[in-house]
Amino acid sequence: SYVLSQPPSVSVSPGQTATITCSGDKLGGRYAWWYQQRSGLSPALVIYHDSKRPSGIPERFSGSNSGNTATLTISGTQAMDEADYYCQAWDSNTAVFGGGTKLTVL
Amino acid sequence: QVQLVESGGGLVKPGGSLRLSCAASGFTFSDSYMSWIRQAPGKGLEWVSYISPSGTTIYYADSVKGRFIVSRDNAKNSLFLQMNSLRVEDTAVYYCARDPNGAQGWFDPWGQGTLVTVSS
């Protein structure tokens, strides 16, 4: 079965850039999506089709996908960005999620 | 606005059954691909099932295949998940979500979730 791997945790100082990776075999050949889940809340889409931002998502969120790695970048990270982030893709009629990355804004 | 509201969660014994519901509003439910996704306490997200607008195309995760049945009632803007032969490891918050892309895309929005606890 297809596996997406994410680092369990990433720490960043306020105002700095946070980078969260998602690795999977030939992931760049398929679409990747990213979700933010703040504590106690439901997940919410922050990036679709590798790099597009839904309405209402701040410009500081960006995404890319190439080779075996999709990347979520948060520029000028704010305290409100502290959350769990999950990548997602599809493989053989199955939606696959990465294990999640806990972003801590120190 | 687009809204999904799950219900039907609760405490059930191993081997028991439970039926979850998801009420949709604010969009054309009958044109939408829908999924169930779950999250065990303190764990990550796990996709459970997917159903096409007409209900003719359905997929399940291997972990629930043969035990769970997804269905929908387009006239009532509702999605369902019949869970049978429940196991302790099925304990999770269950979310319903729409796939706005049409098929095998992203999930947006998500409902608030309903907690299913399987315990003796």
Image (cartoon, grey):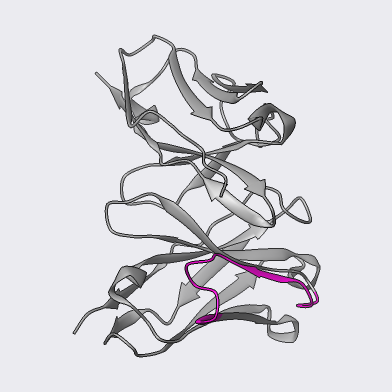
In the image, residue A29 sits, relative to residue A74, either above or below, namely: below
Q: Residue at x 54, y 19 (%)?
A: A60
Q: Is residue A9 visible?
A: yes
From the viewer's perspective, is A37 left or right of A106?
Answer: right
Q: Nearer the viewer, residue A2 or A65?
A: A2
Residue bounds of the magenta highlight: B54-68
The picture places residue A61, in percent across and down from the top left corner, at: 55, 23
Q: In the rendered image, which quarter contains the C terminus of chain B?
A: bottom left
Rendering coords of residue A65 (x, y %): 65, 24
Please tell me which residue is depicted at 43% across the width and 31% down the height of the picture: A6
Asked whether residue B108 appears in the rendered view, the answer is no
* Magenta-colored stretch includes residue B62: yes
Q: Is residue A106 above or below residue B104?
A: above
Q: Nearer the viewer, residue A59 or B56?
A: B56
Q: Residue at x 76, y 50 (%)?
A: B101
Q: Residue furthest top?
A: A16
Q: Is residue B79 above or below residue B42?
A: below
Tell me which corner region of the image, top left, top right, bottom left or bottom right, holds residue A17.
top left
Q: What secondary structure predominates along the stretch shown in magenta?
A: loop
Is residue A83 found inside the magenta-colored segment of the image?
no
Residue at the extreme left? B120
Q: Is residue B105 left or right of residue B11?
A: right
Residue at the farthest front position: A1
Q: Is residue B117 above or below residue A87?
A: below
| Viewport quadrant of the N terminus of chain B | bottom right
Horizontal and vertical percent for residue B111? 51, 62
